[in-house]
Image: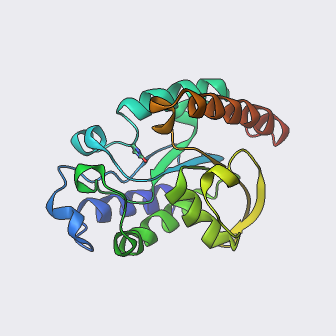
Amino acid sequence: MSKEAILEAVASEVKACTRCSLWRSRKNAVPGEGDSNAKVMFVGEAPGYWEDVKGKPFVGAAGKFLDSLLVEAGLLRRQVFIGNVLKCRPPGNREPAPDEIEACASFLDRQIMAIRPKLIITLGNYSTAYIFAKAGIPFKGVTEARGKFYQANVLGLALTVFPTLHPAAGLYSAKYKQLLMEDFRLLRVKIHELGLTA
Ligand code: URA
């Protein structure tokens, strides 16, 4: 099966998924999107209001900010793949529940294994905890982990993990906005070093 076929299969399963209770309140599932040959993959937490309406990741206010951060890192949205730990919106944007993360896990894992990225950027606590657990890296919270590059083995793939804050944090705190900008500037340098530009 080609990687495109795997990603399509995952997306159709996600759209029909009833593995946890979130399907009852969703308007649209959000499988994730981007280049199936992406070397750089972003992992967010869960769809919010606009993602649920449109069925696409990071299309609300946090997504607009992410777009400007991508520019900071010298990346185009169409060069990367953007996914989430949860594929359906938790009502009222509450935090993901452990049983929801577990029920959804195989979708993200299959996306990672199909894409085989060289660099995974985790956005916020939940996605960092998720990827660190896969890599066997101890995790104390994203504010401590952020802004550093970790050589890791994730699902049998040797790659670099770069945790940063969730872009939504930069919308309510000038300090977090600053930290996000700093992290994405570091990312720009690393992407050049690793030769990950298109
Ligand atoms: N926040 C996320 O974590 N993911 C999205 O897709 C949108 C907002």
Task: Please name the residue shown 76% across and 48% down the image.
Answer: 148
Q: Quadrant of residue 55?
A: top left
Image-quarter location of ligand 1: top left
Q: Number of labelled discs? A: 0
Q: Is residue 195 visible?
A: yes
Question: For the C terminus, which image quadrant?
Answer: top right
x and y, in percent, of residue 104 in the image: 38, 69
Residue extending farthest to the left is 24
Q: Judge left or right: residue 163 versus residue 25.
A: right
Colour treatment of the image = rainbow
Q: Quadrant of residue 8?
A: bottom left
Q: Is residue 120 above or below residue 100?
A: above
Task: Please name the residue shown 63% across and 50% down the image.
Answer: 143
x and y, in percent, of residue 84 in the image: 44, 54
Q: Is residue 1 visible?
A: no
x and y, in percent, of residue 40 in the image: 64, 45
Task: Please name the residue shown 41% across and 75% down the image.
Answer: 102
Q: Judge left or right: residue 124 versus residue 6.
A: right
x and y, in percent, of residue 173 in the image: 51, 31
Q: Is residue 168 above or below residue 106?
A: above
Residue nearest the viewer, comparing 197 with 147: 147
Q: Is residue 181 above or below residue 17?
A: above
